[in-house]
Image (cartoon, grey):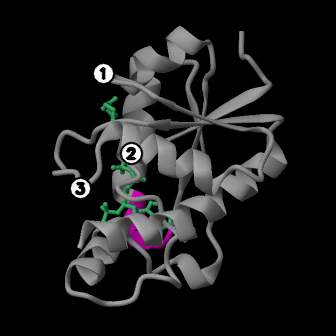
Amino acid sequence: MYTKLSAVYPGSFDPPTNGHLDIITRASKLFPKIIVSVTDNSVKKHMFSLQERVDLLKEASKDLPNVEVASFSGLLADYLEKIDTFVLIRGLRALSDFEYEFQMALMNRKLNKNIETIFLLPDQSNTFLSSSMVKEIAALGGKTKDFVPECVEKKLHDQR
Ligand code: COA
């Protein structure tokens, strides 16, 4: 049986960008409760710790009352089972995201048949954004103000 009230938006969010916030905002209008769930992506080397990413997302989404931020480790399918929530939100920026997202959605459903993944499209202005690009721009002294929430911009700046 589905817990219909919540949806989980999982990701590594290293760091959260305006594109992530765009998806969180859209999802918050569709579901009574969104649990943004942060984890470490085993194939990525993260710049910010799990706790830093959770704190940044809490700050960036503080004006959205039905958004909660949590973290998890291990399999996403197990985490969903544990919190009894089976709706997943993922963003699709371009066709290039599709193959990875398609594979992940089907694998999650194979791991737990109750899991349904819903894809949301960000605003066109956010389709070219990625966390790695933002980190590279920041590391090379470029301006990231237009791509990330203010708290992330500050954190990237402090990191230099
Ligand atoms: N706007 C802008 N950028 C976006 C975006 C959007 N709407 N949606 C995704 N992105 C970008 C991110 O910036 C990020 O860029 P990067 O690759 O340069 O870092 C990339 O797309 C994806 O990052 P994100 O969505 O934050 O997380 P992820 O793809 O690293 O997350 C998990 C993947 C965490 C959901 C997945 O690894 C997972 O489920 N892990 C748990 C273990 C597990 O269950 N594994 C089996 C899965 S089948």
Task: Give SS at disc 3.
Answer: loop
Tag 1 near tag 2, CB within 8 Å? no
Task: Work out whether residue 116 or residue 63 is closer to the camera in this orientation and state it.
Answer: 63
Q: Is residue 93 visible?
A: yes
Point out the tag, 3 or 2, that comes first from the N-terminus: 3
Point out the tag, 1 or 3, that comes first from the N-terminus: 3
The answer to whether the beta carbon of the residue marked 1 is less than 8 Å from any atom of ligand 1 is: yes
Gap between marks 1 and 2, in whole Å?
A: 19 Å
Q: In this view, does 84 lie above or below 106?
A: above
Of discs 1 and 2, which sits in the foreground? 2
Q: Which residue is drawn at 31% across and 90% down?
A: 142
Q: Residue at x 80, y 42 (%)?
A: 65
**Which amino acid lies under the numbered mark 3 shown in the image of this protein?**
Met
Image quarter of residue 137: bottom left
Q: Is residue 138 above or below residue 11?
A: below
Q: Tell me, for residue 74, which label it has, or none.
A: 1
How far across and down, in percent of the image, does residue 131 sit? 35, 66
Task: Give SS at disc 2.
Answer: helix
Image quarter of residue 116: top right
Tell me where the magenta segment starts and ends, as one range. 93-98
